Image: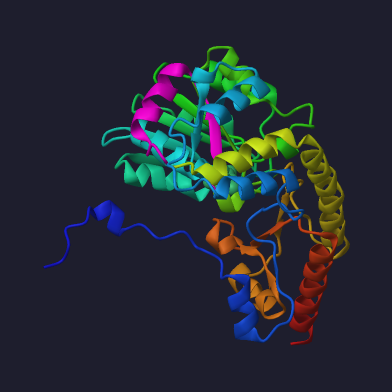
Amino acid sequence: MKPLIRPNILRMQPYPAGKPIEEVQRELGLTEVVKIASNENPLGPSPMAVEAMKRAVSGVNFYPDASGYLLKQKLASRFGVDVSQVMIGNGSDEIIGVIGLMFLEPGTEMLMGEPSFLRYGAAAVLGDSGLVRVPLDPQLRHDLPAMAKAVTDRTRLVFIANPNNPTGTIVSRQVLQSFVRDLPTGVTVVLDEAYHEYACQDPDYPDGLDLLREGLPVVVLRTFSKAYGLAGIRVGYGFASSEVVQSFNAARNPFDVNAVAQAGAMAALDDEAHLERTRSANKTGLARLMSGLTAMGYQPVPSHANFVCVDLHRDSAALYGELLKKGVIVRPGTQLGLPSYLRISVGTERETDLFLQALGEVCAQEVVA
Ligand SMILES: *Cc1c(COP(=O)(O)O)cnc(C)c1O
């Protein structure tokens, strides 16, 4: 007999994991492979975080602190909120899933931009709720006026990635403020600020914490995976009202942020110099990638994050395959809802140059053929 798995789960697809670098290298006989597909920090983690994690390893016979007490204290004082408003999880991915469990059930609806971060949709499927996707505006920003119109009395959650992934665009402070203030009661907005550390230098970029301080129904998500360079240890965090955080803590797995990860995250928060280096390297690297693409005649979407989304006017799955043969792994838009686009993370200078060179070669081949 077939296992009686819920039909909505049977319709789901697993996350489109990229191939490990070593595997690509072996299969294609390449000596150098660059992976600029998941918006990781090309400078690596903070050396202080690495040291702290090494020290923590010798204590792993003990369970981690289930509440993440010290990490939450540090986050609370850094960001000026009460510790009862702080949540941590096994990457913001886990927090997104638990928030979905908390608010969504059959008969309710979740609202998101299209295209936006893939895991939001999964939260709706897992919760057996309705999922309403509202297309981005022509500049590929969240179309908040259209999203406001799509709210119904069944709507429980609205997910907004700011900056958005995969487009790198932001919604401005004013537009976001009036959207959230005008929502009917009973709707919670999840502001996913995974790229906050890159975007926050733009004066137009709203800090979700300001909305939370105003008492508005928002959940603000951040992560150690991007600018902090700790994607491999899986720590995300967030801020919400203490009522939401209390239920979140009841629903989540108690030991989901492991002891090594807690130690690494705390040390990373203390290493402000590393964060500053990361920001400044990203600024230079982003300019290099943008101007390289522009010089080739493309119009990359202006980005507020550490990646660039660009329309190459061809099937991105095929292009992805051609670039892979040259040892460059990027994210094809076919996986992201933008079939003719690529999403390229800002890597080191060398990685960016290898990508631009490979793209140039692939496009030259096409012209000859
Ligand atoms: C990368 C990313 C995340 C996932 O972060 P983790 O903390 O690694 O789970 C969440 N949201 C967006 C928009 C992202 O791009």
Residue 155 appearing in the image: no
Q: Where is residue 257 in the image (x, y as percent from the top left)?
A: 48, 41
Tell me the residue at 80%/63% (across/down): 352
Check if residue 81 falls in the magenta segment.
no
Q: Point out residue 164 in the picture as x, y percentages from the top left corner.
A: 62, 42
- Asked if one can make out residue 154 in the rendered structure from this viewpoint, the answer is yes
Residue ranking furthest to the top: 214
Placement of 334 over or under 182, stated as above or below? below
Please state which of residues 49 and 133 is positioned toward the viewer in this rendering: 49
- Residue at the image position 85 percent from the left and 61 percent from the top: 349
Vertically, is 184 above or below 318? above
Quadrant (top left/top right/bottom left/bottom right) for the N terminus? bottom left
Name the residue: 88% across, 62% down. 295
Q: In this view, does 99 lie above or below 136?
A: above
At horizontal 46% and vertical 17% (from top left) the residue drawn is 242
Query: Position of 346 compared to 162: left or right?
Result: right
The residues colored magenta run 234-255
Query: Is residue 175 shown left or right of residue 11?
Result: right
Q: Position of residue 143 (x, y in %)?
A: 59, 35
Q: Which quadrant holds residue 94?
A: top left
Q: Which of the 4 image quadrants contains residue 296?
A: bottom right
Q: Quadrant of the C terminus?
A: bottom right
Quick check: which quadrant has ligand 1?
top right
Q: Is residue 254 magenta?
A: yes
The foreground one among 287 and 311 is: 287
Task: Indicate the position of residue 334 as horizontal and vertical percent values.
Answer: 55, 63
